Image (cartoon, rainbow, N blue to C red):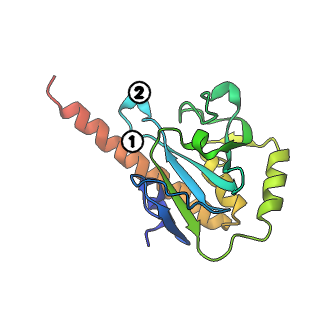
């Protein structure tokens, strides 16, 4: 299994197995506690690699996903951040139907190995009552999802740092390729 730092590139994070790959068809097999990762639009006006939005499947009956974004005043109509450039500000926790969460974007579903935490439903109730501060580096949708699933803090921090390092490398590589194209 791949390191958690590769999760944003389509690999299963450590401690999770892949239920659905980014390019495969959804077969209705999501379960309570599954981690959804949606590939959102490119950053840097289309020249960057894009970014990923995380949410956790929290209701099999209603097919809902709980997720965390910047406040609605800084979001798109779907509730997913319109740009990855918002570095901090008021956060917003909500539940949406999985079709609204994923939209027409490519997405992957990961399942935590073993059981979801017994505190999962209590974690959701608590999260829905809070108004957390959003910070792209220290308190984003991936931190939020991993916290709901009781993934340890060190694993979350390492994942975020490694993902940012990989994303910056891809962005730098893409920008260098763009500069080398003939005009």
23 up-or-down from 88: above or below: below
Q: Position of residue 178 (x, y in %)?
A: 25, 33
Q: Secondary structure at mark 1?
A: loop
Instruction: Identify the residue at image location x=80%, y=61%.
Output: 121
Q: Quadrant of residue 159?
A: bottom right
Residue pointed to by mark 2: 45
Q: Position of residue 164 (x, y in %)?
A: 48, 50
Q: Position of residue 153 (x, y in %)?
A: 67, 64
| Outermost residue toward the bottom in this view | 114
Instruction: Identify the residue at image location x=53%, y=55%.
Output: 161
Q: Position of residue 166 (x, y in %)?
A: 41, 53
180 up-or-down from 132: above or below: above
| Outermost residue toward the top in this view | 183
Residue 31 appears left or right of 133: left
Residue 105 appears left or right of 68: left
Q: Secondary structure at mark 2?
A: helix
Instruction: Identify the residue at image location x=53%, y=36%.
Output: 84
**Position of the N terminus by quadrant:** bottom left
- Which residue is nearer to you in this view: 138 or 84? 84
Instruction: Identify the residue at image location x=61%, y=52%.
Output: 142
Residue pointed to by mark 1: 49
Q: Which mark is residue 129?
A: none
Q: Mark 1 packing: few (<14 Cα in 10 Å), some, or many (20+)?
A: many
Q: Mark 2 packing: few (<14 Cα in 10 Å), some, or many (20+)?
A: few
């Amino acid at each position: 299994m791949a390191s958690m730092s590769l999760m944003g590139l389509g690999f299963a994070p450590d401690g999770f197995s892949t239920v659905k790959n980014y390019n495969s068809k959804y077969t209705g097999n999501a379960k309570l506690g599954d981690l959804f990762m949606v590939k959102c639009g490119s950053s840097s006006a289309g020249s960057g690699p894009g970014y990923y939005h995380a949410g956790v499947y929290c209701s099999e009956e209603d097919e809902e996903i709980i997720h965390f974004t910047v406040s609605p005043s800084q979001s798109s109509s779907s509730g997913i951040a319109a740009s990855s450039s918002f570095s901090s500000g008021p956060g917003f926790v909500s539940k949406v139907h999985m079709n609204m969460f994923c939209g027409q974007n490519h997405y992957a579903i990961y399942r935590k190995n073993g059981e979801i935490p017994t505190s999962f439903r209590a974690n959701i109730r608590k999260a829905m009552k809070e108004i957390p501060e959003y910070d792209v580096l220290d308190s984003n949708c991936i931190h939020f999802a991993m916290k709901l699933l009781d993934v340890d803090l060190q694993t979350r921090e390492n994942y975020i740092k490694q993902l940012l390092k990989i994303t910056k490398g891809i962005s730098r590589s893409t920008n260098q390729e763009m500069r080398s194209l003939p005009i």
